[in-house]
Amino acid sequence: MNPPLDNILEVDRLITSFETDRGMLRAVDQVSFNVPRGKTVGIVGESGCGKSVTAMSIVRLLPQPAGRILGGQIRFNGKDLIRASDAEMQAIRGGDIGVIFQEPMTALNPVHRVGRQVAEVFRIHQRMSKMDAWDAATEMLQRVRIPAPGQRMMDYPHHLSGGMRQRIVIALALACKPSLVIADEPTTALDVTVQAQILDLMKRLQDEIGMSIILITHDLGVIAETCDEVVVMYAGRVVERASATALFEHPLHAYTRGLLQSIPTLETPSKSVLKTIPGMVASLADHVHGCRFCQRLDRRAGVTSERPKFAEVAPGHWVETCPQCMGNVEP
């Protein structure tokens, strides 16, 4: 795969495994995608499909000592992050790459005031004095639209609502104006009104800073509203990758079609039963080498023994070309 030079991030055949009692198990199995400069790339899939592990592999925040990157390349601005030193990665995380974690209550230190936590980013990455860092942190809270930011700087995380804590986490991620932000399900625990506010905030800050975003979610509505390109993951693999327009208008893989069909629309009859995808994602220890979606649907006619080719079937539209999943058979 030869990505164009205007990509800020290039993930090529990434393999991430975890050491368990049953041996090394692959959670991410040769995943490849690119993130263009200034664009938003969505990674979508059910829980357990490898989305968050892929994100944590990029910034090398895998659980230790179990998590390991066993192969592939992660090039950020041309630099291979897998081979970067720990000191280099510490400078990149929070500086050039910001991370918005899934659960703000666990991302924030409960025993420190939020002002100290935001100011610490400026002190570490921009070598500011305590006073200058405090002023910069207060300004950052104002930019993420937290009312009375001077007062909120003195609060502890448990004093704030879920939406306010998520804004603090966004402030932490964007403090040093990173060129790439990884947002791991940033709106999952929020109600729809606050969710819309957070998404609007991220879009506004993206326009101001010119950053790229990797948005990890299981909500296809959020993907349709915010993303330029979409990566669909299933069981540790990318099964489809395309522009958001192409994916929603012409989904090719059976798993993608199943996800889209499970979304209620304005035409859905009241109180009707929504369509679901049969079965469940197999555990890491039970993954087959071949088509894993066929494994879920119990299709055993040879398709679960040989891995389908991942090919470009239309300009910019890539799909795992399993003959069963590419056919007209619905999941």
Image (cartoon, helix red, strand yellow):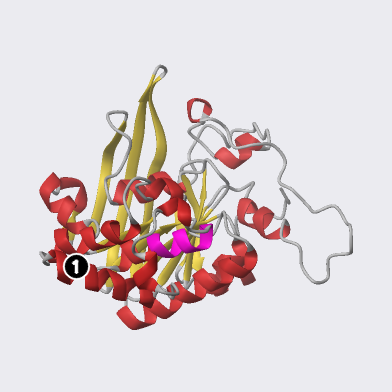
Quadrant of the image containing the N terminus: bottom left
Residue drawn at (30%, 66%), measured in percent from left and top? 180
Residue 104 seen in the figure: no
Helix, strand or loop for the magenta stretch, by majority: helix
> Between residues 194 and 64, which one lies in front from this camera angle?
194
> Between residues 110 and 54, which one lies in front from this camera angle?
110
Q: Position of residue 70 (x, y in %)?
A: 27, 36
Left or right: residue 62 versus residue 261 is left
Q: Which residue is mark 1?
A: 133
Q: Please, is residue 160 above or below residue 277 in the view?
A: below
Left or right: residue 137 versus residue 286 is left
- Report which quarter residue 179 is drawn in: bottom left
The amino acid marked with disc number 1 is Ala
CA neighbours of label 1 inside 10 A, class few (<14), some (14 to 19), many (20+) = many
The residue range painted magenta reads 162-169
Q: Please, is residue 167 above or below residue 236 in the view?
A: below
Q: Position of residue 50 (x, y in %)?
A: 46, 44
Residue drawn at (47%, 50%), measured in percent from left and top? 103
Residue drawn at (73%, 51%), measured in percent from left and top? 330
Residue at disc 1, secondary structure: helix
